[in-house]
Image (cartoon, rainbow, N blue to C red):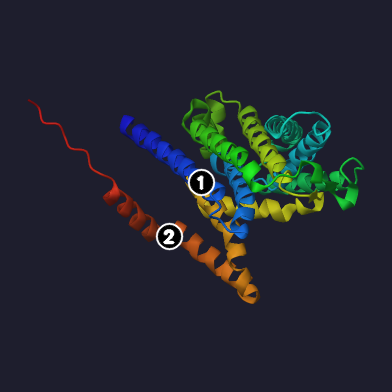
Amino acid sequence: MQLTQKKSRRGDLLTAAAVAMLLAVMAALLYTGSLTRQVTNMLIPTAVYIVMAVSLNLVVGLLGELSLGHAGFMSVGLFSGCLVAIALTNTALPLMVRLPVSILAGALTAAVFGLLVGLPTLRLRGDYLAIVTLACGEIIKNIITNLRVTGGALGLNTTAIYAGAKELLPYGAALVLLTVAVMLNLKRSKYGRAIMAIRDNRIAAESVGLSVTRYKLAVFVIAAFFAGCAGVLYGHSLANIKAAAFDYNMSIEILVIVVLGGMGSVPGSVVSAIVLTVLPEALREVADYRMLVYAVVLILVMQATNNPAMKRFFGAACKSLTPKRKERTAL
């Protein structure tokens, strides 16, 4: 048991270190001017999709429930946070103050909406929950589209708060690290073990006194909170935002990232988000065959990640690369 916990803790530390190293390398390349404009423009969307995928993995992977309304919570956080940021532009506050305040405002608003949506819906399970969350996401999108304060169908003009990748990357990196750290620590905590117990056997979890609804609601609110954070960060990288862009297609796209990376796997979600964000841009030169190549790559990766033989191969490779500890001889 202790050996398993040590291995799990070591794996979590390696994951956090790898993500931090990747972010440090990209920051160094960005600030030294070594990246092309195309790569620079993908940095913030990639960070946003990593946060969205890891936060949705809390619901889909850790809790085992299917949610298709994640883009709705992202849009709630995006518009509320950007409205706060626009209001703060009239003050003398610098970006390093305005952006964290607007991210917090958007995240809290998204968390409240997650609570309001989760209270009546999380008593459902499986396909029923997926259908209800999908409908809630579409309702949120339509409400935002018809509000005057959000710009209506024309969208919200965010040129006043627009910032480039060089200004936003430190905040994006901090948000990615925070999301990964929360996910990894939650999995190893007693609350995470309770959530996984609910996922594995709901009846047994209830029989030992676990409040299933309370734990499910907490996971739902945490996931909505980080979706709101990602939305505000994404809104600062655009000059105009429309609610129509945050429909069920985006929710399904994020779900594909989670499934492709592995249910409950934080490193898988990070790698999958990077691949699925970069791959469409890399295939622009073969635009006529881009969707075909994209689909083939998705199928091959899903086959590789779900193939027992491939899992054994990569497991043996990782084991061979791990240095063995020398046993201490008794004196």
- State left or right for residue 318 relative to residue 259: left
Q: Position of residue 267 (x, y in %)?
A: 48, 46
* Earlier-in-chain disc, 1 versus 2: 1
The disc at residue 28 is 1
When asked about the image quadrant of residue 36, the answer is bottom right
Taking the view exactly as shown, the residue that stands out farthest to the bottom is 288
When asked about the image quadrant of residue 323, the answer is top left
**In this view of the protein, which residue sits in the foreground, 96 or 224?**
96
Name the quadrant of the C terminus: top left
Determine the secondary structure under disc 2: loop
Q: Position of residue 315 (x, y in %)?
A: 34, 52
Residue 161 visible in image: yes
The disc at residue 307 is 2
**Kind of residue at disc 2:** Asn
Which residue is located at x 73 percent, y 53 percent? 248
Taking the view exactly as shown, the residue that stands out farthest to the left is 331
Q: Position of residue 219 (x, y in %)?
A: 62, 33
Name the quadrant of the N terminus: top left
**Kind of residue at disc 1:** Ala
**In this view of the protein, which residue sits in the foreground, 276 or 204?**
276
Residue 158 visible in image: no
**In this view of the protein, which residue sits in the foreground, 131 or 322?**
322
Which residue is located at x 85 percent, y 44 percent? 144
- State left or right for residue 171 relative to residue 149: left
